[in-house]
Image (tube, rainbow, N blue to C red):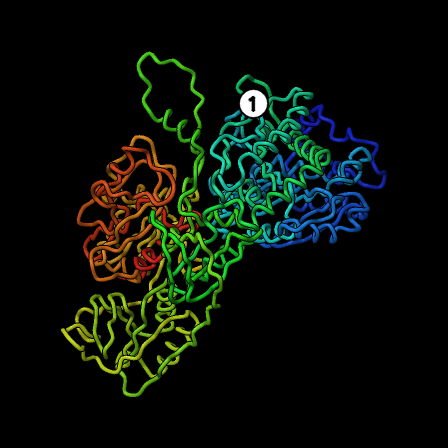
Amino acid sequence: MLASLSAFVLLKQSSYDWYKFGPYASGVPRPDVTLGYGPGDRHTTFREQEKALFAIAEKAKAKVKVIEFGRSVEGRPLRLYAVSTAENIKRLEQIRLANLQAANGQPVSADLPALVWVNEGIHGNETASFESAMPLLYNLAASSKIEKDLANVVVLLNPTYNPDGHERYVVYYNSISVGGANRDAFEAIEPRTIHGRTNHYRFDMNRDRVAMSQDESRAEVAEFLKWRPQVYIDQHGQVENYFFPPNQRAVNDNTDRDRVEQWTQVFGRACAATFDAAGWTYFIRDTFDLFYSGYLDSFTTLSGAIGMTHETDGGRLVKTTRDDGTILTLRDGASRHFASAISVIKAAATHRQALRASFAKFQSDTVTGKFSPEVKGYAMTGDLRALRRVKAQLGYAGIESSLVEGLTSTKARAFGSKDAKAVTLKGATLMVSLLQSQGRLAKSVLEPQPQFEPEFVASVLKAHKPRPAGDFEENDEDSFYDLAGWSIPYAHNLEAYELMSLPSSTRPYADPEFKFDVGRGTAGYAWIYQDDDDILGVMDLLSQGVKGMVTNRMMKIGGKDYPRGTFVFLRARNDASYVDKVRETAKRYGGKVEILDTSYPDSGRQGPGSESVSALTAPKIGVVFGTGERLADVGAIWYLMDRVWKLPYTPLRADNIRQSTLSKLTAILVPSDVTLSSDAVKTWVREGGTIISLGDGGTLSAFNAGAGSGTGDGIPGGIFRAQLNPSTSLSYGYAWDGKGTIPISVPVGGFQFFGSNSNSVVKFAEGSETKLLSGWAWPDETEKALAGTAWLQETRLGAGRVVGFLYDPTDRVMWPGTYRMILNAILMR
């Protein structure tokens, strides 16, 4: 207790003055008065912050409006605090609606204030921004000096984007902290199980703006789209010194790079002036790029704001020691975030007119399509359910799309082709016009290949080359920071087109009526496997006690062809209730079910009664969450099992799986960063169990099924064309024309690749055929390194098998086109 108090007293000696913008309104309580300690003196919990913010908002009602816009996964409220002058708050709804008009390219009143959004705490263990939110709101609400700036600005403060991760971290930290500043202090090491950076499902939500999967992401974006601010600051830690833009290259081409450079210079110099006056160090144009569309800063920039990441050098720990022996505190980090936010707000107020004009032009160029002279839209075809998933994904980001049929374009180019021609697409088609408010964002997430600056390309290629002996030239090259390719049509494995000419008219797609023929004297029913929902529906049926089978060869019955992987439900194997169960389940999952009047094949010997049809059983699934000491990289598969597939499962510890537990399971999903290798597990596999390794790792090595070859510089995350072997059950549900392999797009990143052998299920083409679809490949290296290697292996061991993916297909839940292979591995034997 004495040590804790001593640390508290030391931190209170920090010289930063949070209250230098006085005089202040006397009735508005300072955060330190409400909390009983100063900002940054200790880690504040979610409810303590809520108490301090509510106290300010209650006493400054004329200037602060509190908006609850959602809930976190664990049920904590997500709130926005709108702060401005009393006059602006009175007409806040008017301002909001007028600003939406500007976002749609329409002219608005010249006196409209600029909107500045300040986001705190997306990474829950980067705690300085969370602490800075309280003095920031107080100063905005109570300072007379800042009042004149607020006449030109409405500030939208999100004080905690990720309350679940933050609470998980600070409750743990506060429970063991004694204020030790040494780097090897016990409190300096965050257990992997805590991992407060991420939300409940352990997602890094600053990478989620393409998949748009998490509750917090969807709620915050929905609120963002109601406001469409001109400036968006996303405040983080932890770096050495402090970072604010301008960014390093690459910068996404759809952002208008000149505009980004102009305004990040304005705001960067405003922050620099404040930091220089305080004697604080900082850096620019290093580490943090603006290329991947899934960051908050790039997403908001593509949506019309000047989106910026700010990274502080204090936070996470109450205090720690720098390399030079000086002490860095949580208060230091919070004070720098506070100062940078105030600097940006003041700069936005100063440049309000130019900022609003820039926003208006940016959005006008967007909705008219001027920003994209050649491509005017995109079209995707495929199973209706897959198209609806893409439509929902785009909708969460505010991107409008339409389900149409009979789309005709006088000039379109298929993804992967260089030639444009007239096309007519039959059946359900998802069309996205770029002539909309979110047109730039739409292009950035749909285009097959993002464009790098020529200067960036030259820089990374220079850095990639070996330096000649005796070359001591100082290097200042750019580098990759995150994914280089993420095209949504490729990620969903859909046929897609760039539209250079939008159709003059379209016909809305009419949902087909669900048909189910009960029939008389039938042999049973065939459920055609075309989409993830089909196999999920079948697993649902199996769990209801319906007996099902799957065809391992093509059948011709009743004048119809049934491809390999068709699910069959026979009357002879089920009681009378099975008909209603099949009908209701197929309707719920959108399945196509056809009657089998006979088991007699039209030709050949393949029919429902032949040996080419295998019985199915309801899977009993285990998911390895980690060991007793650490949580594995389990978040994506955890989320998919809970929220998307909704499959029951048993959570497991890799270091303590009992035989009695194994005997109840048929398949175990294993993250790549944990090893499952006990003798009991190996025996279970040989006796018929299936291990599914989500990425190359220790489990595959333990079963001699890991990666072999590699490349010098790793691939920075992209999408490549591969070939799926149609002769394996892992290929079921993927359309096959009966010739050769099935083309499929898969994510690839890193250094190591599987050697190809008889166990290869998905592999890359031999020879010089180009495999890159979206992202980056090192010239004369990547394509050669990938040639003939495998992406998915299926190794048989006794009666069981080990299914191993090179790259986690569930990563960031961004690659739905690969999910069917996981589901097949779970169900098939």
**Residue at the spot 37% in from the left edge and 59% down from the top edge:** 423
Q: Is residue 49 visible?
A: no
Q: Quadrant of the N terminus?
A: top right
Q: Is residue 458 left or right of residue 756?
A: right
Dot 1, crowdedness within 10 Å: few (<14), some or many (≥20)?
some
Q: Nearer the viewer, residue 599 or 604?
A: 604
Q: Callout 1, which amino acid?
A: Thr
Q: Nearer the viewer, residue 338 or 489?
A: 489
**Residue at the spot 80% in from the left edge and 37% down from the top edge:** 147
Q: Residue 544, percent across and down? A: 38, 73
Q: Nearer the viewer, residue 500 or 27?
A: 500
Which secondary structure, mark 1? Answer: strand
Q: Residue 500, percent across and down? A: 44, 52
Q: Is residue 208 visible?
A: yes
Q: Residue 545, percent across and down? A: 35, 74
Q: Residue 294, percent across and down? A: 49, 44
What is the residue that sits farthest to the bottom in this orientation?
520
How many numbered discs? 1
**Residue at the spot 33% in from the left edge and 55% down from the top edge:** 822
- The answer to whether residue 491 is above or below residue 17 is below
Q: Is residue 667 left or right of residue 365?
A: left
Q: Nearer the viewer, residue 3 or 432?
A: 432
What is the residue that sits farthest to the right in this orientation?
26
Q: Quadrant of the C terminus?
A: bottom left
- The answer to whether residue 175 is above or below residue 433 is above
What is the residue that sits farthest to the top in this orientation?
470
Q: Which residue is mark 1?
A: 321
Q: Is residue 336 left or right of residue 483?
A: right
- The answer to whether residue 152 is above or below residue 242 is below
